[in-house]
Each structure stands twice: as structure tokens, then as C-alpha cells.
Amino acid sequence: MPTSVAGTPTLAQIRSRFPSLASGFAYLENAGGSQVPAFVAHGIRDYMLTSYVQLGAGYPQSDVATDTVARAHAFVNRIMGGEATGHVILGPSTTQLLTMLVGCYSRELKPGDRILVAETGHEANIGPWFALERFGVKVEVWPVDPESLTCRIDTLQALLEGGQVKIVALPHVSNLLGGIVDVAAITRAVHDAGARVVVDGVAYAPHRPIDVAAWNVDWYVYSTYKVYGPHMGALYGRADAVEELTGPNHFFVPRNLIPYKFQLGGACHEGCAGLLSLGPYLNFLAGAGENGQTTREMVVRAFLAMADLELPLQKLLIDYLRERRGLKVIGPQHGERSRVTTISFLASKRRSSELATALNRHGLGVRSGSAYAYRLCQKLGIDPEEGVVRASMVHYNMLDEVRRLIEALETELPN
Ligand SMILES: Cc1ncc(COP(=O)(O)O)c(C=O)c1O
């Protein structure tokens, strides 16, 4: 895969596609949720005003609705790189999709089976697995190494050697730490032990191309509202993993009706229209004009362009935080490509909540807390209720916004 892209539009052109950015407020809480290009909002509006009817009824508006929902699944699968290998299930959020998946596995797993959950995870990919303990399943934490702030692969291998592991649940990127994990290597180790991986890609997906086929993951999930789209979640399942499970839908929904067997009540139809409307934006970012098919190549080019745009932002902020007395980065201490622009830090002399509120008063949208990496905070000795201050940029952010954050920190912090 190439690592960078020529022909990317300018930042001013990019920002002009996002009406909300014109307000001057610095949106620096993108790991919580991103802004949407106007294409997406217009796509939802147009759908609701022209074809807001139920699927499969046979009249023209219903045909449009049916086609929209089907194309949205295919498009998200293309974004994930899984069109040839698996299926996409859409739902209201990552948390709901993972909880649904755990429910499916509750029918399959036996007492004594083991599940490993990475301690770096968001609670959405930890807590639901612990619920399986009531069936006699053993859920164990794959602990974070406090030195490297990673869940080490040698620790995983030792845990796998104990046998009976059926599932390993992990984040691709911790939404608190920001470092990118080698999902392909972990997946190989997990598959060698005869288990499946469930990867939470939420904190990775806004920043880099997803490639579920290359990584050979069984399950991969992300939240579309953090990737410039509507408030939904998308779960990819490799074909064999998807087929072996019974979904939670009604008894008369055939087992081979994928993804519907997993989609209680179906997917959000207008949300599907919004997802599809991301296509022109990705084409534009890929330097290919807005019209035309959003091929897999366009998707990859668009996300590589995002990665290029983010790099200077993270370098600037990390360099400042690393050098500034009284501030400490929690996560990788560098601004290289092996991390994303989700940057957490602690101030030695100010509570995170106080500092975040003070920064908000400067028109900077950062926030404090555990970011639901609750257990990770506990492990690192950080009060999860206070947590860290997190600034999370994406490709549309400006160096000027990061400079404003640095200036505000200089104003708010004692020397
Ligand atoms: C890494 C990670 N996983 C899971 C989630 C939960 O996503 P959702 O809000 O779609 O349930 C989040 C949300 O912040 C997240 O950052």
C-alpha cells in the first residue's frame, strides 16, 4: 500500500466542505465524534424528503429505499476492505453491535471456554464479554504493560498457551493512548491458537485506511459518526464467522439472511443515505473530483491523504507536551505515523476536569475523563472520574487550532 498521496485538495478547500467548521470554534474532540461534510447532511435530507418509506414493498419509492440500504452496506464494506471476504452489519453504535455479538456468542460458548480482553480497550469491548461469565465462560484480562503502555504480544502468546481460548477482544488503537497496534500479527497469533479476534477499530477508523481482508480479522467494528458520517456503527464479520452464528432476530428470519439476521429492527435508513453520501467527499479527498464511483482505490487514497494531513498536527502538539514542564503525555511520546492524533495528557498541578473546562472557555473543544477506557485508567493509577485531558484532531484541523491550544495551556498553567 502506498504511504502518501499526491493531488490532495488544500486544507481551505477541505474545510469549506464542513459548514460547522466556519464558526471559528476549534473542534478538538473528534475522537468523541467528528463533523460531517455537507454532502452527508444533504444526503440524509434528500432521502427523507423523497424516499422515506419501508423497504421491499414493491413501489418505486420503496425500491429506492431498498437500494439505498443495500448500497450503504456494500459501501461500508468497501471502506473496510472486506467486500470479497465478508459482510457488514449496521447498527445504532459500536457498543450496541458488540453487545449484540456477545449475545450471539453466548449461544456458542461452553463453560470453561476462555475469552481474553485487552486492558487497553474501551469498555464497549470489555464489559459485554464479562457478562458471559454467568455461563461459566472464563473472561481474562490481557494486561497492559505499564512501561510500553501496550498489551504485548508475548503476554498474549503466554495466555493463549493455556488453551481453550475462543475469542480475543482488543482495540486497534486505544482511544486514550493513541498508538496503532499490529492487528495482523495479533490476528495470526490468535488464529494459530484456534480463536477469533474481535477488533474495536473505532479510534483507528477516522485516521487510516481499514483493510480487514489484509489483516484477516474475524470481526472489526467502528462508529460511523466518528468517521464523518451519521450516528451509527458498522461491524464487519468474515464470512465464516458470520455464517456460524445465530443472529438475535425473529425466529422466521432465515439464518442465511445476512446481515438481517443480526439487525434487530433493521438499519437506520436515512443514516444509510448519509453513509453513501460520504462517497463524493472521499473522491474529493482522493483528488479525483466529487462525482463518479467511490472505488476501493479512492477510499484508500482518501484515508492516506487524511493521515498525511494529520501528521504535522500531532508532531506540533506532542513536541510541546513532551517538553513542557508539568504536563505529561499518556501514550506514545512521539508524533510519528505509528500513532494517531488522539492525544491524552495530565497536568501535575491542575485536575483534568478543571483544565478541560478552562480550555473550553478559550473556544477549544477538548474534554476530560476516562473516555470509557475506565479499567485502563484504573490500572495506570489515574482516577477514572477525572481521567485525562484529551485533544483529538483529524485531517480537517488546522495547525493554528493546535497553536491556540498551546497558547491556552500556557495561559492556564502555572510555570
Ligand atoms: C475506542 C472506542 N470503542 C468504542 C466506542 C463506543 O462507540 P459507540 O459510541 O458507537 O458505542 C468508542 C466511543 O467513544 C471508542 O472510542
Image (cartoon, helix red, strand yellow):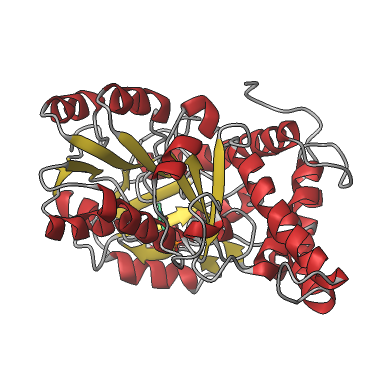
Whether residue 42 sits left or right of residue 215 in the image: it is right
Q: For residue 302, what is the image quadrant? A: top right
Q: Give the number of marks.
A: 0
Q: Where residue 116 sits in the image (x, y, percent)?
A: 21, 41
Q: Quadrant of the C terminus?
A: bottom left
* The quarter of the displayed image where residue 19 is located: bottom right
Q: Quadrant of the N terminus?
A: top right
Vertical relation: 218 (above or below) 261? above
Residue found 27% across the figure and 59% down from its top? 128
Q: Residue furthest front?
A: 252
Task: Out of 268 and 278, give the one closest to the viewer.
Answer: 268
Q: Residue at x 71, y 62 (%)?
A: 274
* For residue 168, above or below residue 265: above
Where does residue 160 sit, x and y in percent of width and height?
Answer: 18, 28
Relative to 295, does residue 377 appear above or below in the rendering?
below
Residue 109: x and y in percent read 22, 47
Q: Which sits in the foreground, 257 or 25?
A: 257
| 31 w.r.t. 172: above or below | below
Q: Is residue 199 left or right of residue 360?
A: left
Q: Is residue 127 visible?
A: yes
Specify whether 171 is left or right of 249: left
Where in the image, quadrant-wise, is ligand 1 located? bottom left
Query: Residue, x 48% and y 43% (percent of image)?
Result: 237
Work out whether residue 414 can be spotted: no
Find residue 325 and report its horizontal and vertical position in percent. 30, 46
